[in-house]
Image (cartoon, rainbow, N blue to C red):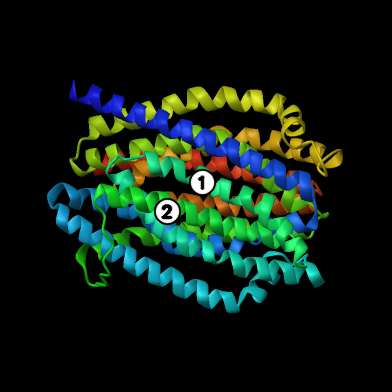
Amino acid sequence: MVFDLKLKTVAKASIALAFFSFIADVVALFRDRILTSHFGASRMLDVYYSAFKLPDLVFNLLVLGAVSSAFIPVFIGEYKNNEANAWRLAQNFTTIIFLMVLTSAGVLWFFAGSVVSLIAPGFSGTDREVAISLTRLMLLSPVLFSLSTIFGSVLQSLERFWAYAIAPVLYNFGIIIGAVYFVPLMRIHGYPEVLGLGWGVVFGALLHFCIQGTAAMIAGFRWRPVFDLADQNFRKILKLMVPRTLGLGAYSIDSAVVNAIASTMAIGSISVLNVANNLQFVPIAVVGVSVATAVFPRLSMHASGQELKEFKEKLYAAMKSTALIVVPLSVVGYFLSHWAINLIFGIGSYRGTSVDLTAAVLAIFMFGIPAQSLIPILSRAFYALQNTAIPVSVSVVSILVNWLGAWLFAIHYHWGVAGLAAAFSIAGNLNFFLLWIFFRRFTKHHF
């Protein structure tokens, strides 16, 4: 009976997260529709997507790796034993991470020009200068996201998912406000319009921070400056996060390499790749990520109690329910890719060849959606077991395969941006199958 009750709790949390994830993705698609209708598959939209690479690198290296793989299991373990120590851990972790992100963003602001030359070698002249300015502006976002993500991890640990689920919706609304209001303001005052999108990203990050910060305070979190690098729990998080951080760093580099290749192709290639990727991520986020987020605290509790039977039942139920949804969706998505792209984005400046190419890329992405939806769940199983080395190692292997495939299909065989999508799908499937093989071996020998 206890198990059934917990399973229902996970199911309800998964449904709630999936619902708000779907709302967030609908808003995100509306956001992309506004962007593509105004800018089209243009160099300025290429610049906008490229400007995310450096802020994402800062966030992935310093925040996401620690929170997604290390903070939550350690916080839950401490919270079960001593709530006061758990809150002190959260305060210490927040202070240290915030200072690290703020310092890193400040340093990288000065080197933005050199970085843009690496991630977008195809940009030159005015395009390059605008990309540098936009990148510097958007470095404000990881500073806000660093705090917001920690607040969100506390809420996940306590299984309070509502603010965590709503935050992405507000973030996308911020970008829409940037597109609708800030872009015209930039034009009126003689600045490049695309800078208005950058201010929208910063505003969205601020909304993301406010909703999760408020919810975390209601849950009991109080941020008091605590700076203790010698704290035993912080050192444990640091040890656990290193492999995951290296993996996310490799992922960021992978994204930058793909962006660099796309920047040397026809104008609009980066935009086409990102538009198709954002649409294919909808089922991954709505189903895979939502289920993974909901089941993670339960997996962590079962792992800490050495409850292998309950751990596997939760994991397999989550994977089975995900597969039953995303596999049919990917098949339908393959056959309706052109219709979907034309319906959602085929207005304004985004027509004809842009729609055809985006649809072709989306169809190729469909082959990787089942694997990409299951990877977050299986990865969190490893994190709950406090093993970050295996999923990170597998991720690095898949990234290397992606690079090889990108060179082979996009450059050697001249498939262009479609070749980049093919390489990504192949690498994603390899990632999942390797994770599954290593998971079975790990649980067999370590429980």
**Residue 136 visible in image:** yes
Depth check: 239 or 192 in front? Answer: 192
Q: Quadrant of residue 96?
A: bottom left
Q: Is residue 409 visible?
A: no
Please say if 359 is above or below 329: below
The residue located at (41%, 49%) in the rendering is: 211
Residue 228 percent across, percent down from the top left = 24, 72
Where is 74 relative to 7, above or below?
A: below
> In the structure shown, which secondary structural element does the residue marked by tag 2 occupy?
helix
Q: Nearer the viewer, residue 416 or 352?
A: 352
Query: What amino acid type is highlighted by mark number 1?
Result: Leu
**Percent position of residue 176, x then y:** 63, 47
As drawn, the label of residue 170 is 1
Residue at x-position 79% and y-position 57%: 43
**Residue linked to disc 2:** 210
* Left or right, 314 with reference to 330: left
Quarter of the picture holding the C terminus: top left
Q: Secondary structure at mark 1?
A: helix
The tally of labels here is 2
- Which residue occupies the foreground of this view, 181 or 275? 181
Q: Are marks 2 and 1 in contact (CB under 8 Å)?
A: yes
Q: Nearer the viewer, residue 115 or 37?
A: 37
Say the numbered circle drawn on residue 57.
none
Estimate how packed mark 2 is, as few (under 14), some (14 to 19) or many (20 or more) residues with alpha carbons within 10 Å.
some
Q: Residue at x 35, y 32 (%)?
A: 315
